Image (cartoon, rainbow, N blue to C red):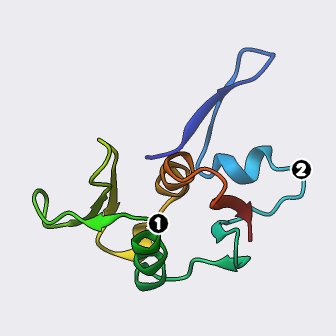
């Protein structure tokens, strides 16, 4: 049993299995995408993301968890850690990239 419990005004609890659909007024759960602002292209694979990150001075970091892709900037303590499978690339990972690369990326609805 997974989901989110909501408490109604009348004191009744309800388990909602997909809370995004429950609160979305349009009824559709929109997927987020990572957009490279200078080219306005959606990042659709790790190979395209890695190419952009290398141009920004990021390097692959091979020490650590083998189930993760990691990038670091030699001049900083920043580390971007991503799941090895692109299908597990979530908005949390996208926003991590946006914060560490201001004015280069943006997260948008697909």
Horizontal arrangement in the rendering, residue 28 relative to residue 58 (left or right): right
Across and down, in percent, residue 64 comes to: 11, 56
- First in residue order: circle 2 vs circle 1: 2
> Which of the 4 image quadrants contains residue 103?
bottom right
Task: Left or right? Give the position of 28 relative to 64.
Answer: right
Total residue callouts: 2
Q: Which residue is mark 2?
A: 25
Q: Which mark is residue 22?
A: none
Q: For the point 74% across and 76% down, which residue is it?
A: 40
For image coordinates 32% across by 55% down, the residue present is: 73
Secondary structure of residue under mark 2:
loop
Q: Position of residue 99 (x, y in %)?
A: 54, 45
Quadrant where the C terminus sits is bottom right
Residue at x 75% of width, y 47% of height? 22
Which residue appears at 49% of the width and 48% of the height?
A: 100
Q: Residue furthest right?
A: 26
Q: Is residue 67 left or right of residue 100?
A: left
Query: Residue at label 1?
Result: 56
Where's residue 3, x and y in %? 53, 44
Where residue 37 sits: x, y (%)?
A: 70, 68
Q: Quadrant of residue 51?
A: bottom left
Foreground pick, 110 / 57? 57
Nearest-to-viewer mark from 2 and 1: 1
In the rendered view, would you say 93 is above or below 60? Answer: above
Residue at mark 2 to residue at mark 1: CA–CA distance: 38 Å
């Amino acid at each position: 049993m997974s989901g989110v419990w909501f408490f109604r005004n009348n004191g009744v609890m309800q388990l909602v299995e997909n809370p995004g659909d429950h609160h979305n007024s349009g009824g559709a759960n929109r997927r987020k995408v990572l957009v490279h602002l200078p080219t306005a292209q959606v990042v659709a694979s790790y190979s395209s993301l890695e190419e952009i990150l290398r141009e920004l001075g990021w390097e692959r970091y091979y020490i650590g968890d083998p189930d993760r892709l990691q990038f670091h900037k030699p001049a900083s303590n920043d580390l971007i850690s991503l799941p090895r499978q692109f299908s597990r690339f979530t908005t949390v990972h996208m926003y991590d990239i946006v914060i560490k690369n201001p004015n280069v990326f943006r997260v948008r609805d697909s």
